[in-house]
Structure formats: structure tokens, C-alpha cells
Amino acid sequence: MKAIVEVQNLYKSFYGALALNGMNFTINEGEIRCLIGENGCGKSTLIKVISGFHSFDSGELIINNKRYEKITTAEAIAEGIQVIYQDFSLFPNMTIAENIMMYSTVAERKIHVDWNDIKASAKKILDQVGFEIDPNLYVAGLSVAQKQMVAICRAIVQKAKLLIMDEPTTALTTKEVQRLFEIVRRLKDSGVSVLFVSHKLDEVSQICDSYTIMRNGRRVFQSDVGDAKITNEEIVYYMTGKRYSNSKFTYVPKNDIPAMKVNGLCYKKAFRDIQFTLRKGEVLGITGLLGCGRSELAKALFGLITPTKGSIEISGKNVGIFRNVEEAIRYKIAYVPEDRLTEGLHLDQSIADNIIARIIRDYTNKAGIVNVKRLKKKQYESMNLMEVTGMIPGNPANSLSGGNQQKIVLMKWLASEPNILILNCPTVGVDVGAKSDIHNIIKDLAIEKGIGVIVVSNDNYELMQTCNRVLVMKEGCVVEELFIKDQTLDEFEMMTERAES
Amino acid sequence: MKRLCKTSQFALFALLVITILVFGVMNHDILSVASLYSLARTCTVPAIFALAIMVVMVIGELDMSYCMIGAFSSYAVFFALHEKSITKFPLLVIFLAAVGISIVLQLLNWFLIDQLHILSFIATLGTQTFLKGAILAFVGSSYIYDIPKSAVDFGTTYLLSASYKSGVATQLPLAVIIMIGMYVLMNLILEHTVFGRKLYAIGGDPDAAKRAGINVSQTRLIAFIIVGVICGIGGVVHNCLGRCSLPMPTDLVGQELNGIAAVVLGRGASQRAKGTVSGTLIGVLLLQFISNNLIMIGVPSYYQGFVTGLIIFVGLVTQTQIGSTLFSKILGKKGAVQ
């Protein structure tokens, strides 16, 4: 077994903060290794050091048996190291063909650009990978999956020996993920090593031969090809350094008046004849495959889309349907959207301002002047509701990691003291530690405050952890109602799958 | 022809042709050779400056100082010659001196943008204001009446001349050759050299460019030097072509947005290419043609801004996805313009 990249005792700090704290790491020829760790553990820094984007402070970096004191991006590329970043690093203002060939064009140090050669070579690679697309299209108009394919093609042209993929599955659909895995395996067969950086445990165990787990800039676990696979619980333990208890949620009936009752709700082709009751202090899950209408239903319950038929009862009172968000808010409903980046937060605004964004209207007098003193008090109370590591209220929201951003979205909505909380895929892209925190928050809200919570998700583990009842949707209808008691995750998965098929 | 239809400049080119035809029907003089020479003459300086701002826009930045830099460097040279009462001075040296000053000033822009990471719009607005102040405070604010003979000769050497039916003569100045030469050279550099493609790469995504192994700072540095060269030449050509040959310190300032408008028109609303040489040239021709000839079709001159703005909108809309579909329907062509 020959090591392609070996890293020993590597240190790297940014403005005094240690990002890599004595990191050790090895990847061999022809293996698919997974690099796992929570946000901010130094994964990205490690990748950027190996690829020459950042310099390192001290330690050893050995690539193909050659020791580097410092390495430039051009040298890393020459050594066959290719990184596919989350943003793919493509040039939107250039065609697919030119994007694929750009690295070679730069590396060849020629003066003249041979357009015919660029187009022919790009076409050859696209055929080789089996990606059917016109190479003369501009990258700006492509979908995420297509952009990723272009980035992979570009890496292959470089005769990559090591392909590093940073969170490659984040924006892909399940089908696209499978297609990506197929290509990754094909690359491995042709002798390319792949370093797969991810925190999606189920995907990781599907594709990887070996693991490296990082925490606080250090390696805490490494397995090699052929070693027994470790369980997800162990991975979580290594990543976070904490053992998480798998305590399920138990619903204690409060009173009989339902927090929300939905009667025969329909919306175009998305869902029809939806009927369910949500009691106070209950956590109701809604699941189903992509396109089954679960997301539309969640939006309809918050007035983001107007249902075509049906009615909603709040606390026993028929309120018809919500035509806009204001109506839903009036009945004290809160909604945490799927995409917090575009729908949930004002990313450049401060965390403190984000938290009061929803309620600021309630703290004004008749002339529209804000009562700052009361607002500040409320802001302070809201922020102490849950623990967010590294939170400085004055910093912008995008200074936080994904999981902590999601907590801010929750805080913002909880500040409005809702009776009903709808969460649409609350932990997508959130790392395990924060995920567990968010689950605990959801359970506490239901138990302590008696809020009726709806969790829309396709993460079975999440549903098992947080809900007492789960509705399974298929083609716009609720086809099954499951009660979470003491089934195992496998049993639960089988039940939902049976309902979905 | 088919390939031509597919280029992003086709819609704009068609718009130019249509505009010329419409104007031509309303006043036949507009379709004369004399009118063409007049257009070429008035286009020369705006076209050179549009080329400068285009290079800046290709690398994804904006420059509000390029006209001021051109005016400053040229005026500074002529002012120095005037102060020393030199009337005989080689033209080439005048050009070189102005280009040198321009390069230094563009390097200041490069330093602010690339090294200090100041937003280019703000940084260059600063440069513009600073230079405008500096020229008034330290150099001078008056017309210069005695510019060297070589410069006067350059401005009044004509390749060809023609006259309108009314008898008014127009000439095609030598400087047009310089402008065309610069366009041909820039097209060669941007489309057919690796360096040119690096500029587009940086404009597309500077981080991605760095990851591709491009030395971003260095490439930007060379780009700003090129912009400096273009500005310097533009400034001197402007002063030589000025009918009375009277350099005035700030007379180019305020033209910045016209250059930007030409580039934006030329690249299309899709922003895909960030700017192309051929598109920019067509953009300049279109804008200049309109402002030249509006008066000839009987539109009062105070409508000029309004009509120019209207044409910019039409130019942009025809190049959007929806607009191009409509546009090609009107033209009766099936292949949508990209």
C-alpha cells in the first residue's frame, strides 16, 4: 500500500485560533477514505492545506514521497491532487468545455489558446464519464448536479491521483447521489483515491473503505481498508466527544381540545383530502418520499401557499384556510423553513437583530416607535433559551455554523411565543451534535410549554427521536399513521417503506 | 451566418443595423459616407475609453476613475510642455509620458483593490475625486492654447474626407487607425491567449481562479497596467482630436458611465461573458450613432439622454432569454439568440 498524501503533526492557525492542532492523516492509493468531523473541526482547513490554498505553520506534508515545506496550488495540481469544493470553483462566465480544460490551459504555460483542442478534449472526457451535455453551454445556467459533473470531469482531465470532494452530496437529490457514488466507484477502479468529506453518516458508510474522524483540529480516529466498519453511534461519539442518549419522546395528554385540526385540505396536484389532528404538547411527524406533498402541506399550514379546498380548526375554532402568512401568525403559528439560508435568516444582519426580526412589530407604540427597553429584555430572554456555542449577539448570523444558525431560526420563532410550531426538515445540513440539541429543544417545547409541534422530515432517525406519532404521505395523501412506541429504527424504517410503496 | 446568429452580440448588432436603417429612412444623409466618417471620428475616443473599462469589467471590477486618469495624464504632459514653452516635441514621447503617468495611477487603483481589498467602485471613485482635486490644486485649471505641433498635426491628419449634400465636409482622422488597432490587439489578447482567459477566469470567480493555479494578484496587476496604457493613449488622442486642440483638465470626467453602458450593452443582460471586445465596439457604435444623429432626424438635443436610455433598455431586453425569443420571432428566425 503506497501513501499518496501523508500529514504529520500539522499545525495551522488563523488570527491566533488553532484550526489544525497536530493533525495526522494518511490516504493510500486506490482507497475511498471518508473525513468526518463537526463544522469547524478543521476539515476544510486540512483540505485547503493539502491543496496548497493555505500555507501551514509547522509539521510535515509528504505527497508522493516528496516532502513539502510549503506547497502552491499549481504544485498540488501537478502532484495529481484535485479538490472539488462545495461551490465547485467553476467559472460561470465560461463554457463547460473551457471550464473542464481551464486548469490544463493554465498549467501548460503556453501563450496561445487552442480552442479546437479545448473543445475536442472536453468532449472526450464528457463521453468517458458518460455525461451527455453540450460542451458549449455556459456554466451559469447549469443545475447543481450538472455543475458537479463538470467539476469531476475537470478533475479527471488533470489526471487526478487524489480527488478530494468537500460535502459533495449536500445539494443533490437521492438519485443524483447514487449516480455520483457510481462515478466515484468507477474512479476508484481506475486507480484514483477519493477523499470524501461529509457528515452524513448513512451516505458515508455506503461508499467509504476507511475513515478518519477529526475533532478540534486533531485526528481522533482512523481506520484502514479492511478494518471492521464502526457504528454510527461510535462515529458520533468520536466527532463530538459526547455520548448522546437515545431518549425517545413520550407524549403526556394535556387536554382534549386539539391545537390544530385539519379537515379535507387540498392543494392543486400536491396533496388532497388531508385530515389530521394535532394535540397540545404533541410532536407529530409528517414523512414521505420527495414529491409526496409533505413540504407543500407544511407551507399550506403556514399560509405560504393557499389551499384550494378544506378548512383548519385552531383550538376548536374553525378559521377556514390561511390566505397569507399574516393570518397564520395571528393564530400563533410559527414555521421554520427548509432552507434557512434563503428563507429563515437575514445572514448579514446581527444574530441579536435576527432574533427580534419576527416580533419587533409587537414592541411598537401607535406611532410605530420601538420600545427599545422592552425589546432588549425580550431579546436577552430569547437568547438564553438555548445554548449556542461561540455566539456573539453582535456578529452576523453567517458567522455561525449551520446547526447554530438553525438554533437562531428557532429562537426567532420561539420569541413570538407560538402555540403551534411547524418545522420543515429542521436538521438538514446540521451536524450531529447540534442535531441532537435541536431534537432535545423540540421535545422540551412540547413537554414544558405544551406547544403542538409538527416535524416534516424524511430522516427516520429524527422522527423516531422526536415524535410520538408519524403520518406517512404518498402521492399527496396520508396513507398511514404510525405510533412511535418501542420499535427499533429498522422496524420503523420498514413500516414507513411499506406505507410508501 | 448560422454561427453568427448564435453569438451573443447578434441581437445587439441587429439592433444597430435596424437603428441605422430607421434613422436612414428619416434622413438620407445619415446613410452617406460623410456620415460614416463623422461617426468614426466621434467614436474614436469613447471607443478607446470603453476598451479600458471593459478590461476592468472583465476581471470583475468597476472603475470610476479611468476617464479622469486619461484626462489627467494627458493634461499633465501638455501642461508641462506648455510651462516650459516647448512647441516642438515628438508625438511618441508625448504618448509614452502620458501612458507612463496613467500606468502609475492605475497601479494605485490596483493597490487599493487587490492589496487592500477595497471595493473597486469605492476605491476608484476615491481616485477620481483625488485626481480631480489634485489637478486643480497643483497642476492647473486653464485651457492650454499652445500644444506641440506634432500633436496638432496628428489630430489634423486625415485619411479620407467626404461631404454631405449640403457641402459640409467630414474627415476620417488618422487616430481611427489607432483605435481599430487597439481593438484588434485586445481581441487577440482576450480571446486567443491564455493570459486573456485568465482575466475572464478571475472575473468569473477569483477564488476559483486561485485554485486553478492562477496568480490572481499578478494577473490583475498586468490587467491594470494594460488599462493604464489604454487610458494614456485615450487621453492624448482625445486632446489631439479636440477640434481646437485645447486640453482642459476635467473634460472627460462624466463620461465614465457611457463607457460602462457600452460594455454592458455589448455583453448582454445575461452577464455571461462579463464583456467582449466585439460587443463593446458595437455598443459604442450604437450609443454614439444615436447621439450623433438624433438631431439630424429632427429630435431636439434635450431628448438625447432619454432616447439613449431607451435604446440601452431595448438592447438589454433583446438579449435576455425571454427578450431573445421574442426578438427572433419578430425576425422570423427559429434559433433563439443566445
Image (cartoon, helix red, strand yellow):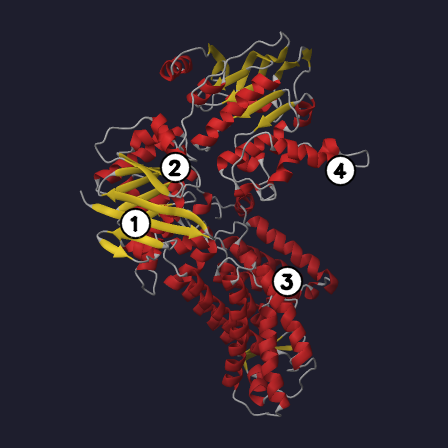
Q: Given this view, does label 1 or label 3 mark the residue nearer the observer?
A: 1
What secondary structure is marked by label 4?
loop
The crowd level at tag 3 (other Cα within 10 Å; few <14, some 14-19, many 20+) is: many
Q: CA distance from mark 2 to mark 1?
A: 21 Å
Q: Do the residues bearing badges 2 and 1 touch, measured as CB atoms within 8 Å?
A: no
Q: Given this view, does label 3 or label 4 mark the residue nearer the observer?
A: 4
Q: Given this view, does label 3 or label 2 mark the residue nearer the observer?
A: 2
Are callouts 2 and 1 both on one chain? yes
Q: Is residue A417 left or right of residue B193?
A: right
Q: Residue at x 65, y 18 (%)?
A: A321
The answer to whether any part of residue B313 appears in the image is: yes
* Chain identifier of the residue bearing label 2 in the image: A
What secondary structure is marked by label 3?
helix
Q: Residue at x 22, y 46 (%)?
A: A3
Q: CA distance from mark 3 to mark 4?
A: 53 Å
* Chain identifier of the residue bearing label 3 in the image: B
Query: x and y percent of residue A330 in the render?
Result: 70, 23
Query: x and y percent of residue B62 in the render?
Result: 56, 60
The crowd level at tag 1 (other Cα within 10 Å; few <14, some 14-19, many 20+) is: many
The residue indicated by pointer 4 is: A370
Q: Given this view, does label 1 or label 4 mark the residue nearer the observer?
A: 4
The residue indicated by pointer 2 is: A37
Which circle's residue, 2 or 1, is located before the other in the chain? Answer: 2
What secondary structure is marked by label 2?
loop
Q: Do the residues bearing badges 1 and 3 touch, measured as CB atoms within 8 Å?
A: no
Q: Give the label on residue B290, or none.
A: 3
Q: Residue at x 36, y 16 (%)?
A: A490
A444, above or below B56, in the image = above
What secondary structure is marked by label 1?
strand
Q: CA distance from mark 3 to mark 2?
A: 61 Å
Q: CA distance from mark 1 to mark 3?
A: 54 Å
